[in-house]
Image: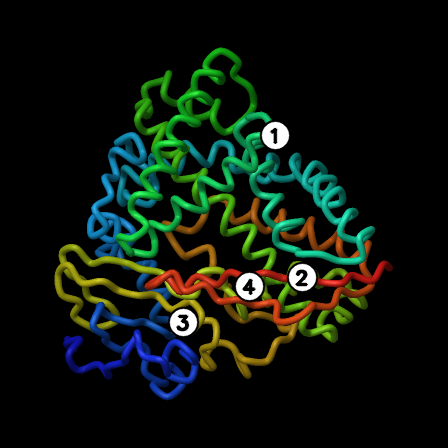
Amino acid sequence: MDSIHQLPEIDIDGDAFRAAPLDTFDALRPGWAARSDRGVEVFSYRGVEAVYRNTDIVAGVIKLMQDMGLDEEAMTGGGANLQGNDGPDHDRLRRIVSRWFTPRTVTQLQPRVEALCTSLIAPLTEAGGGEFMTSVARKIPGPVFCWMIGAPDELGDRIFALSEVVLLAFSGDAKHTDAIMESAIGMRELIDSLVDEKRQNPADDLLSVLLTAEKDGEISLDDVHSLMFEMLGASTDNTAHSAGLAASVLGTHPDQWRAIQAQPGILENALEECARVEPRVRCDSAWAPEGANLLGLDIPADAMVWQHTIGAHMDPEVFPDPRTIDVTRKLPASQLNFGVGRHYCLGAALARMELRSLYGVMLREWESFEPVGDPRVERDTDGSFVRELTFTCTPRQA
């Protein structure tokens, strides 16, 4: 078994890596991993996929929260959630939550999502342009989550704002600790009120599914709180920024937008290509509390393992000519934004439906949309290298 000390070393905080991480990875291929002062850096497709599938490696946010001094129990209510559990407990929780995440429920939501997207696109069209993220992308996931749990639509903006701050836990930076805890408390108070309301007025929604499982003794009330906290945080911010990143790709490559217009049936494939080229989370963290064997590499106990999604998506062994954007490309492997295996995102179908609905409306309403200035502003949330942006555009009506 190989030791991590045999791996090439990279300076993860160096200017060269931050400016062009793909150049660093390409120089190390056909290797699949390197070491840094923070742990193991995995950058090939098979390597990132292997991290997801390795049962000795868990979500890194657990360790990051500990290092930041965040009290997970105080934040989430102390129950069990999907990300923090493996084995039978994870399978049990996933089965319960999956009762709502069915093709039928996603299909039923689609007309409401399309109507919402149409209403958001119209003012931007009438104004002759504007900032896409604040006007459109950030206003979609919050209301959709409200519909999922049977909450009033007007809570959508508050849910998005709370989620955006709580997700800073993935940064591992203690400077965010106070803000995260404040938003986490706000999120717990919101969940408390929603639980009280739903107990009195159950319906055909996700929160009612969880409360039914609690009533039947399958999960505890603390589990309900933790699962709600987890899904509330995961379902809004990432979808909004994925929508914006797709706009940055297609807005700066008008030939690709025209290709979709010529073949509307490739829209779903085109959005997968956009997610490959511009993943929302370019790098994510994992943790080997007891150590692990990863593709023959000996990962020591307590080591952090960093999954570079952007490196995996640009792996020439999997994606020929990977830096070329081609919305007609038949992807030989799935993009990894939604994870792999036992922790594959339960909401992936819902998120994809939201994106398809938005871009279906845009195809119908806009002949083209041109960026004003540089649409991409990289927000490097320390270890996570999260890509966020502002995107001002000028649409041309169809």
Distance Cα–Cα, label 3 vs label 1: 39 Å
Point out the tag, 4 or 2, that comes first from the N-terminus: 4
Confirm or deny contact between disc 4 and disc 1 (CB under 8 A): no
Q: Within 10 Å of the Cα at label 4, are there few (<14), some (14-19), or many (20+) other Cα atoms?
A: many
Distance Cα–Cα, label 1 vs label 2: 26 Å
Q: Position of residue 248 (x, y in %)?
A: 62, 66
| Of the pair 58 and 147, the residue shown nearer to us | 147
Checking the image for residue 45, the label placed there is 3
Distance Cα–Cα, label 4 vs label 1: 28 Å
Q: Position of residue 215 (x, y in %)?
A: 37, 16
| Residue at 57% in and 44% down | 350
Q: Position of residue 269 (x, y in %)?
A: 64, 63
Q: Within 10 Å of the Cα at label 2, are there few (<14), some (14-19), or many (20+) other Cα atoms?
A: many
Q: Secondary structure at mark 1?
A: helix
Q: Within 10 Å of the Cα at label 1, are there few (<14), some (14-19), or many (20+) other Cα atoms?
A: few
Instruction: Give the residue at mark 2.
Output: 392
| Residue at 29% in and 56% down | 173
| Of the pair 25 and 292, the residue shown nearer to us | 25
Point out the tag, 3 or 1, that comes first from the N-terminus: 3
Amino acid type, label 1: Asp
Q: Secondary structure at mark 2?
A: strand
Checking the image for residue 153, the label placed there is 1
Confirm or deny contact between disc 3 and disc 1 (CB under 8 A): no
Point out the tag, 3 or 2, that comes first from the N-terminus: 3
Distance Cα–Cα, label 3 vs label 4: 15 Å
Observer-side mark, 3 or 2, equals 2
| Residue at 28% in and 44% down | 84
Amino acid type, label 4: Ala
Compared across the picture, whether 219 is left or right of 396 comes to: left
Amino acid type, label 3: Tyr
| Of the pair 242 and 357, the residue shown nearer to us | 242
Checking the image for residue 275, the label placed there is 4
